[in-house]
Amino acid sequence: MFSPGLSRRQALRSLGAGAALLAASPLLSCAPPPTRRSQPNVIFILADDLGYGDLGCYGGVDVRTPNIDALAESGTRLSQFYVTAPVCTPSRMSFLTGRHYNYGTQSNLGMRASEVTLAEMFGAAGYRTALFGKWHMGIPEEFSPNNQGFDEFLGYKNGAMDSYSHYYYWGGIHRHVLMHNMEELHEDGVYFPDIIVRESTRFIEQNKDQPFFLYLPFNLPHYPLQPAPGALDRFSHITDPLRRQYAACVWTLDERVGQILDCLEDNGLREDTIVVFASDHGPSNEERGGGGSAGSLRGHKATLWEGGIRVPFIISWPETIAAGQLRTQPAMGTDLLPTLAAYTGVAPPDRRLDGHSLAAVIKSSMAPPPRAIMHWIYAKDWAMREGPWKLTVENDVGFLANLDNDPGETRNLGAERQDLMQRFVASQTDWVRQLTRGRAAGN
């Protein structure tokens, strides 16, 4: 029986069992099998400030996310996926380039034109490419999406935008920031997440006969907290007004993810499309934002505690990636580009990458993680993880946790394991030196 809150199509997707349904139905079983493309489409959906504990499939209990939960059920969910930085710009750069960006050792004005993005990688292989949403990787024209491999761009380059007026209000002169490619776009009063869906469905329908790469960095649930009309009424059970507003924004995001998945199904493209969903970092506690949850994890956006850098990550490709799977191996945002290159057969950029393909991990829970050691830096703070051990240094104070026993980072074991503390400090120093030297040389 279908849940009363789901449409029939959403319920079928949440079952994550298209093959079983075909076998069970005498009508559907007679349909010819779908034709698989040699090069699948790719859609990368990125949430903005979404916490680890804000989805049902990651343990959230007060926010309804049936479409994203169904996406997880149709594919593989990673429980220890990390971004390279706890803030937007460097995290997004790492997702798109497969190279480690952080806030502290590199310029944050924008992504260098010399970087090779997912869009440039796919474009070189004949894919149509588009970005609808928030860029936040450089405002000047030299850093624009159209100069980084995207055939189409509709969105904004700033860190935030009012979803109705399309103005930026959070620093300096208030200004209109919505753009279509290199020109201003005026659609006063039109809800921006709905613009993303409108443009996405148009793009899918126009390019259904050729491979495409679609990057959808939504501006939800980032501030200003502007859920869709009527969404707040669904969360009367939440008494905290800030959490209620935030939950309505997450629900709004989930509904629009469902609309895009529906469009794929309507055009017969679901089995030919890899869909990836992630968040750029943990939930915000900023004065104008807030309301998100990192679940049982410590920390939030702009910190290197688990709640700031461990994020949801889901990848789904029906009939190729196994459904309903969970992987616990640690992975990182830099791994997205080489993973998609491996799945699509597209050649990765001919340069040094910091990421590794996750194909083996996604295939098997017994596969080794792609790296033995993970490093982070944020301004003067830093963190390092090796196996279950993670050292977080905040305001020059070190905190050593065993994440297998203490994922919430509640007990500091540094005094008991001075050997690890000293080795980690030396390893981090060497890593920063190599990273800084490599970036300065253009590598």
Image: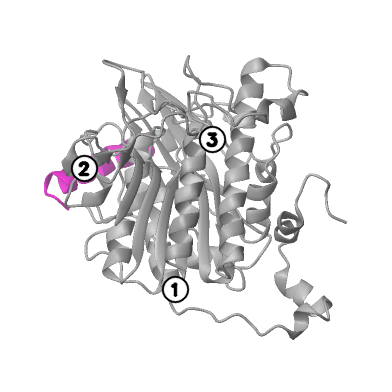
Label 3, label 2: how far apart the Cα atoms are? 25 Å
Image quadrant holding the N terminus, namely: bottom right
Whether residue 438 appears in magenta in the rendering, the answer is yes
Q: Is residue 393 above or below residue 318?
A: above
Residue 18: x %, y % from top left: 71, 70
Circle 3 is placed at which residue position? 50
**Number of numbered markers:** 3
Label 1, label 2: how far apart the Cα atoms are? 30 Å
Residue 345: x %, y % from top left: 39, 74
Residue 119: x %, y % from top left: 32, 58
Q: Is residue 152 above or below residue 234?
A: below
Label 1, label 3: how far apart the Cα atoms are? 33 Å
Whether residue 70 appears in magenta in the rendering, the answer is no
Q: At x 61% / y 64%, what residue is drawn?
A: 265
| Residue 295 picture quarter | top right
Q: Viewer-proximal residue, 299 or 417? A: 299
Q: Residues within 10 Å of mark 3 (few under 14, many from 20)?
A: many
Where disc 3 sits, the SS reads loop
Q: Residues within 10 Å of mark 2 (few under 14, many from 20)?
A: some
- Residue 143, label in figure: 2
Q: Amino acid at mark 1?
A: Asp
Query: Which residue is farthest left?
Result: 441
Say whether marks 1 and 2 touch (CB < 8 Å): no
Circle 1 is placed at which residue position? 209
Q: Of tags 1 and 3, which is closer to the observer? A: 1
The stretch in magenta equals 422-443
- Could one spot residue 149 in this view of the protein? yes
Q: Amino acid at mark 2?
A: Phe
Q: At x 66% / y 16%, what residue is drawn?
A: 241
Which comes sooner in the sequence, label 3 or label 2?
3
